[in-house]
Image (tube, rainbow, N blue to C red):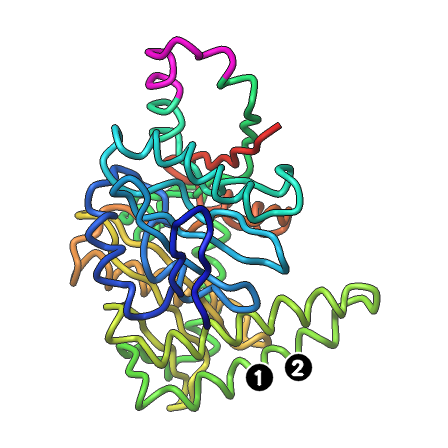
Amino acid sequence: MVSLTIKNYRLLPFNMQTKVLMERYLALVETELSDYTFAQNYVWLMYSSGFYAIVNDTFCLFLLSGEELTMLLPPLGEKDRAHDALLECFEIMNTHNSSIYYSRIDYVGDSFLQSFVNFLEEGTEIFEILESYIVEKKYVDYVYFTDDLIDLKGNAYHTKRNEINKFRKAYPNTSVEMLDPLKHGDAIMALLNRWIANRLRYIPRDHTEMFLDGISNERFAIKRILKHYEDMALIGIVLKIDDDLAGFTVGEKFREHTASVLIEKTDFDILGSAQYIFREFCKVLKAEYNCQYINVGDDMGFENLKKVKMSYRPHKLYAKYTIYQK
């Protein structure tokens, strides 16, 4: 991948070699959003190209999709530098893009948005500046108490307990292991391929192309996870039934007491396996990594995924915004 030069800024390819630099700037950012890690961005970049630049001593992550340039995150760094960098980043995007309407910054958290507005209010052109932007609430991250997901106490979790109990009764020879890419990699890809084949049987014909596009991205992400698992300090477990791999899940610890879940897959035909492996993963995160909270990311606007995540009774919902120029 070649670099881009825009407005005297050199935008360099975002790759594994970027990890140390990005994490140095991430350490200066206070946020509970799961998007603010190297792994979350690197794993899911596929068809679009990632580039970064240091603007006003902040780390700025750009996304080239087609011919248009956007930002995956707001500028990462000290707040007093990030605000000026944000304005400069819009100028970089505007210079490159065919229209300013393509320029936007995604996954902006409440804390950054509030401080950005407060910072601008100190200036003399506050009304002119605010009139130039649109702030749209997009998704929310679902965050849970780890203990709630382990204990599953009360009527609210009655269905979850039943699903797990039925699974354990139907499959008594169940075990959980820490994920090892060398040991489990081939079985994980075989499970994914079976999952895709089974899902295709139930996908309406008019949704097939959308599903295949999405699963292609997911398949690429899983391969990248397995390839760079150790380098990204990821945490994962696999579910085995009679020594056959029936599920896997991968996440990372990204705050002192918070972990996130990057991906989870279980055998499509084994009811209760998803609930079981999620609970077991939470146990590992609590016991081995002292994670008090679990962030499972957003629902990407899918109503069925929203229902599943709400059914686990989140402790908090952290909003994410997109900033556009008018």
Name, please, the residue furthest toward the right: 206
Mark 2, secondary structure of its residue: helix
Name, please, the residue furthest toward the front: 8
Q: Is residue 122 magenta?
A: yes
Report the residue at 63% width, 51% height from top: 304
Q: Position of residue 65 (x, y in %)?
A: 59, 58
Mark 1, secondary structure of its residue: helix
Give the residue type that dot 2 points to: Ala
Q: Which residue is mark 1?
A: 193
Q: Is residue 249 left or right of residue 255?
A: right
Q: Position of residue 232 (x, y in %)?
A: 27, 68
Q: Is residue 312 above or below residue 272?
A: above
Q: Which residue is mark 2?
A: 197
Give the residue type that dot 1 points to: Asn
- Dominant secondary structure, magenta: helix
Report the residue at 57% width, 41% height from top: 103
Residue stretch rendered in magenta on the structure = 117-128
Q: Report which quarter residue 270 is drawn in.
A: bottom right
Closer to the camera, 38 or 267?
38
Q: Is residue 201 above or below residue 124?
A: below
Q: Is residue 56 left or right of residue 127?
A: left
Closer to the camera, 89 or 113?
89
Contact check, label 2 and label 1, Cβ < 8 Å: yes
Q: Is residue 24 left or right of residue 150?
A: left
Numbered label tally: 2
Q: Position of residue 57 (x, y in %)?
A: 25, 43
CA separation in Å, label 2 and label 1: 6 Å
Q: Is residue 17 above or below residue 28?
A: below
Q: Is residue 289 magenta?
A: no
